[in-house]
Image (cartoon, rainbow, N blue to C red):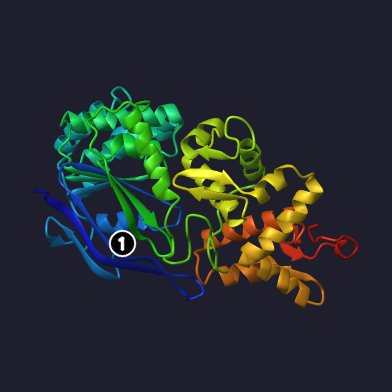
């Protein structure tokens, strides 16, 4: 019988924007982390995964629902739970030894004991000989090892890892992941459960006993895939490749917002995030889909290898192309539509006309900007006007990112122009002399 160590019951969390609006980040989240398991959490950027981890760690409080650690409510930072961050979060003026000792010092552990425990953690994580080094003298992989050692030195029962390997190059990330798994499998650490937030599907399948798929706006668990393969797992094995396909299928099936999205279409509202995909990547994927060996349909994991895009990058490009009607996503495969084929076969000016039509029909933010420009006598509007609108549903960074993507797409389709010096969006000067309607 499973022994729950952390439980989230109907957890809600909202954040207040600078303009006073409220954004619901998590809604009705139910989740149980059991002793003896590694769980991976996948989902789009901004879906609330990191917020969920911080609630579990006691770093922020839930607005509604219960958070339990070993059956008791969590009201703040909890001794048995440690967290590893994506950004290393090291103090640059402290040595490796001092950084690892920080948590022990905060707990009031005597100097000799914390020195002994820190040295043991540093050796365990493979950093012996670097105790006196400063973070700037270390590689990215070594800095992340310091962050992990600082978490493990507290001997946590629960280890939370927030994209702990994403800032590293592929080989360094794989090596560090394997080292963590070896410590776990050999019971060299007292940790009883690990929860990993990741954008890397292969990483999730190679490490986890369960993979959870998070929905967005608001965030909540919408799918779960149990994994029963023994460790160590062979990345090229048929079982692992099949599981990766399954996860891609779960990531591209179902609705970020119930009832609004199917396998074949994506519909946005004005204040939604836009997929983080630039024009060159979108066109590159479309062109590759029309070539051998794909001939219009590709397995997403295989396409990721051929394009050398990360899982996150390819999923974002796939969502953008689906949104614009150039592809369908079906059970983990990407299928080019006739519109996509026609687009690839067109010259640039015809591509821009098609893009113009598709973004106006399918991206409410771009259509809203265009309408505003047409209604304004000068045909000029400051970008801040639209940032304020987006802040009602997105935080500042997300709003800036969404507007930046809208401006890039709008400029390419010649829906409008943008002055990078003044931050002003305006109608194309020669618009009246150019027929932008598609043939």
To which quarter of the image does residue 240 belong? top left
Q: Is residue 330 left or right of residue 342?
A: left
| Residue at 24% from the left image edge and 33% from the top image edge | 229
**Furthest residue toward top:** 129
**Furthest residue toward left:** 1
Residue 12: horizontal and vertical position, in percent?
Answer: 31, 68
Q: Is residue 345 left or right of residue 365?
A: right
Secondary structure of the residue carrying tag 1 is loop
Q: In front: 75, or 163?
A: 163
Q: In front: 110, or 235?
A: 235
Residue 23, visible in the rendered structure: yes
In the rendered image, the quadrant that contains the C terminus is bottom right
Residue 114: horizontal and vertical position, in percent?
Answer: 18, 38
To which quarter of the image does residue 167 belong? top left
When the figure is inspected, residue 303 is found, relative to residue 380, above or below; the finding is above
| Residue at 68% from the left image edge and 59% from the top image edge | 358
To which quarter of the image does residue 120 belong? top left
Residue 407: horizontal and vertical position, in percent?
Answer: 68, 58
Residue 91, visible in the rendered structure: no
When the figure is inspected, residue 265 is found, relative to residue 146, above or below; the finding is below
Mark 1, Cα crowd under 10 Å, few <14 / some 14-19 / many 20+, is: some
Q: Which residue is mark 1?
A: 60
**Furthest residue toward right:** 433
Q: How many marks?
A: 1
| Residue at 53% from the left image edge and 38% from the top image edge | 298
Residue 160: horizontal and vertical position, in percent?
Answer: 28, 47
């Amino acid at each position: 019988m499973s022994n729950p160590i952390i439980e989230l019951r109907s957890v809600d969390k909202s954040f207040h924007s600078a303009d006073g609006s409220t954004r619901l980040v998590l809604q009705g989240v139910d989740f149980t982390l059991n002793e003896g398991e590694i769980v991976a959490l996948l989902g789009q950027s901004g879906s609330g995964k990191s917020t969920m981890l911080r609630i579990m760690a006691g770093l922020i409080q839930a607005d509604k629902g219960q958070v339990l650690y070993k059956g008791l409510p969590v009201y703040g930072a909890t001794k048995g739970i440690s967290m590893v961050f994506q950004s290393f979060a090291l103090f640059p003026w402290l040595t490796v030894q001092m950084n690892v000792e920080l948590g022990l010092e905060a707990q009031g552990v005597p100097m000799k004991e914390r020195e002994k425990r820190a040295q043991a953690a540093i050796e365990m994580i493979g950093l012996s000989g670097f105790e006196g080094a400063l973070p700037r003298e270390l590689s990215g992989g070594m800095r992340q090892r310091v962050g992990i050692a600082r978490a493990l030195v507290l001997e946590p029962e629960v280890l939370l890892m927030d994209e702990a390997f994403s800032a590293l190059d592929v080989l360094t990330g794989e090596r560090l992941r394997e080292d963590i798994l070896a410590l776990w499998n050999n019971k060299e650490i007292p940790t009883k459960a690990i929860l990993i937030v990741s954008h890397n599907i292969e990483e999730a399948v190679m490490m986890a006993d369960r993979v959870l798929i998070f929905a967005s706006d608001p965030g909540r668990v919408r799918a779960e895939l149990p994994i029963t393969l023994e460790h160590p797992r062979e990345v090229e094995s048929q079982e692992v490749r099949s599981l990766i396909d399954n996860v891609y299928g779960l990531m591209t099936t179902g609705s970020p917002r119930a009832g609004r999205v199917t396998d074949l279409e994506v519909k946005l509202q004005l204040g939604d995030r836009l997929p983080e995909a630039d024009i060159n990547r979108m066109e590159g994927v479309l062109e590759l889909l029309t070539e051998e060996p794909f001939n219009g349909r590709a397995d997403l994991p295989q396409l990721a290898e051929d394009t050398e895009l990360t899982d996150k990058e390819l999923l974002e490009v796939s969502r953008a192309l689906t949104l614009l009607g150039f592809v369908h996503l079906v059970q983990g495969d990407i299928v080019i539509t006739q519109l996509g084929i026609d687009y690839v076969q067109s010259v640039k000016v015809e591509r821009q006309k098609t893009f113009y039509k598709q973004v106006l029909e399918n991206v409410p933010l771009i259509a809203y900007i265009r309408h505003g420009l047409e209604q304004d006598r000068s045909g000029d509007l400051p970008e801040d006007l639209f940032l304020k609108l987006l802040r009602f549903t997105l935080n500042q960074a997300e709003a800036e990112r969404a507007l930046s993507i809208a401006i890039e797409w709008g400029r390419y389709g010649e829906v409008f122009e943008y002055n990078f010096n003044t931050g002003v969006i305006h109608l194309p000067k020669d618009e009246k002399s150019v027929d932008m309607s598609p043939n």
